[in-house]
Image (tube, grey):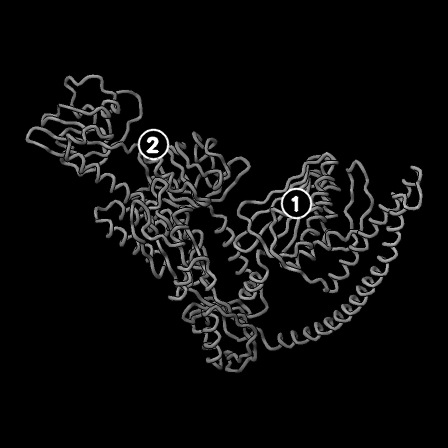
Amino acid sequence: MAGDQILEDLVMSKFLADVVAIANGSAPDDDVLKRFTDVVSHSFGVDRASVLALKFDGIASESNLDGYIRNTKRPYIDNQLSDYSAFPELITYRNEGYKSCALVPLVVSSRVVSVLELLSKSEGKFSESMMGSITLGASFMGFAIAYKAEIGKNLRLAEYFDAAFNNYIPQFLVAQDGKIVKLNKIAIKEFDITGMQGIRISDILNADIQKLLSQPVGMVTGIAATDNSIPNVYATSAVKISDRLVHVAVNNVSDAFMNSALMAIVRDSKDNCIVITDSDFKVKDVSANSQVVLGCARNILLGGNMVDMLSKGDQREFTGMFEDKKGKAKPEFIHGAVTMVLGDSQPYVHFISKRFFNGYLFLLGKAEAERYIERVRDDLIAFISSSSDVVVEVDAIGNIRDTNIVVEKVLGYKKEELIGKGIATIYEDKGILDRDMTYVKNSGKVDNTFVNLIAKDSGNIPAVHSVRMLRSGTDPGGYMIIIKELETKRTLDSLKGAVDDLNGQLKRLRTEGELKSQFIYNISHELKTPLTNIKGFSTLLYNGEFGNLNDEQKEYLKTAIDEADRLMLIIQQVLDAAKLEAEKVKLELKEVDLQNMANNPSIKALEESARNKGLEFTWKVNFDVPKISADPNRLIQVFVNLIGNAIKFTEKGGITVDVSRLGKNKVLCRVIDTGIGISEDDKKKLFRRKFYEATKKGLVQQPGAGTGLGLSITRDLVKLHGGKINFDSKQGEGSTFKFTLPISPKKARKKDQQGA
């Protein structure tokens, strides 16, 4: 299994090496791009790779998808093309037979100069690690093409020296003996020249005039160091313009210039960053996204030694990779995986390193996904080894790659006898096997098909098998077949009978629960009528309709009215709970603007209640949240329950309602407070038990007891809308209750059915 990782690393290294070779070539741009797309297709098994119309002032096509790529400057991936894909172009790809699509922008100086289009006939083709490699290669290729175009323009200008002499590039007129005859202002400034008397070009550049004329255009040379400063690096162009004069133009490609270009490649990446060190691994430069990738700020890494940033166990192995091994040529690329120790952050990263001037360039990428995959593979191996059923791993053409030891007991074969044989040799009816493997290959699943297996002694073994497809990285795929003896199937039938009995008991309990809910529903309705009369007559007395009252009498009546309101609320909650349990609540869906909901009288009353308690109250809705389809009255009930609880359990600070968009089809609503939080014991009971109210330790005032139904009702109403609710809380620091709502419940249900 470890070989898969080594193969993946080799593919990535070979791909980057091929991209560098193509970019450094002298072929026309069209040939360069054709070679680049061929390398992408070959390296990653992509069915179609092409570069959309290259145009340095933007992309010629202004389709919806192209416009999205140009505006976001980020790759776009759809690993499951369907008739419901976000852009018309993706539906066209789907109709052409493709199942996965990725588009990668080629960005130069914050401009999209081209788009790499990748299409595959396999679902789930484009993984994060693959896209990280392709994005880095595409960015390098875009930069190289733009850089060549700029250099070519500069060289054409240099042929017309008089017109271009005051260009931003340092330029010289040099005699055949190497003396400088003339230079422009930018050259004087660049090289700090105070006088021209007797100055030769070799005093400035690390080459005489004959060497400059003989070397290719753009060859890198260095300025002769006349002080202790670090030499700059220049690409030179020398052109003979007469028998006695040579025009020399230089372009600064020093560390700072190259570093900034390299850092721009990974500027927006969340998975890869660049570190540049000297030959002793002292960090000279770091891309600005190191905080996102490594969990450590750039300024902390600068000046430190990369070896000291590794775990003790990785330091020796890391330095050994860069040591000269006797009789072996050092590879152009060095790669590996290490754990970095950066304060509280200890990221596990893959790295690819290459010599860079007098030091090293490191491309670091998150490797947590690879570590997770390794653990899953280990678990899979452990499962195969410990299972009481026969587990067989089969390659794409039907040969057995591995099996567990149980096969010896069931079929009589030694494990070694089966490895390499065709799986069909142990099946009596090969048609069933071919049918099931074909179905699984086309994304289906096979469970418990009856088959007859051929044992080593030629006897038949009645069994059932289940088949699944296995895919891993560049592996062409294979199958996992789990075989159960019929004896196991009989045991399952027995268990099924027990399950049927339990289902019968469950139905009886549901019937009893429905009767209980109906009883509560009827009793609650009966209570509302006399309670309404009590409140009505008490209000008339309080308002003096039957004569004036003294203050003490009015105070008693006010208490009676308030308690009647509280009892009415409790009855209403019991009614709601009973109706929800009996599934009698029907939503009246309307278009709801969550921004305007802040003006609802119930919300305003809660806002006033919070402010009267000395608490801040904030209602925030992000700009990209659309109107949703929901029952406004039931949605207000959800917010009132959550905000009311937040006010009850908060003594200082405030309450914030925050609404944001979550993907294409959902919104996320959060009610955040700075209250006393929820204990670990209470966390286990919230949402799970009706009539349960969390303890109020730490409150200055002890409010009246509630019914404990609020959160249960809230959960059921959110679920009825097609959403989910949860919470995060830390005792003493506050709580956040968060729930999702579909933008359109009908669309959400349709999507769920398709995914089922």
Compare residues 211 and 384 and report the one nearer the observer: 211
Q: Is residue 192 above or below residue 1?
A: above
Local crowd size for mark 2, using a 10 Å CA cut-off: few (<14), some (14–19), many (≥20): few
Q: Which mark is residue 256?
A: 2
Q: Which mark is residue 245?
A: none
Residue 706 is situated, as x and y percent measured from the top left of the image, at 80, 48
The Cα atoms of the two marked residues, 2 and 1, are separated by 55 Å
Question: In which quadrant is the C terminus drawn?
Answer: bottom right
Q: Residue at x 18, y 29 (%)?
A: 165
Residue 523 lies left or right of residue 196; in this view the side is right
Work out whether residue 13 can be spotted: yes
Tell me the element at label 1. helix
Q: Which mark is residue 599?
A: 1
Residue 476 lies left or right of residue 428; in this view the side is left
Q: Is residue 451 above or below residue 596?
A: below
Residue 469 lies left or right of residue 641; in this view the side is left
Tell me the element at label 2. helix
Q: Residue at x 79, y 55 (%)?
A: 572
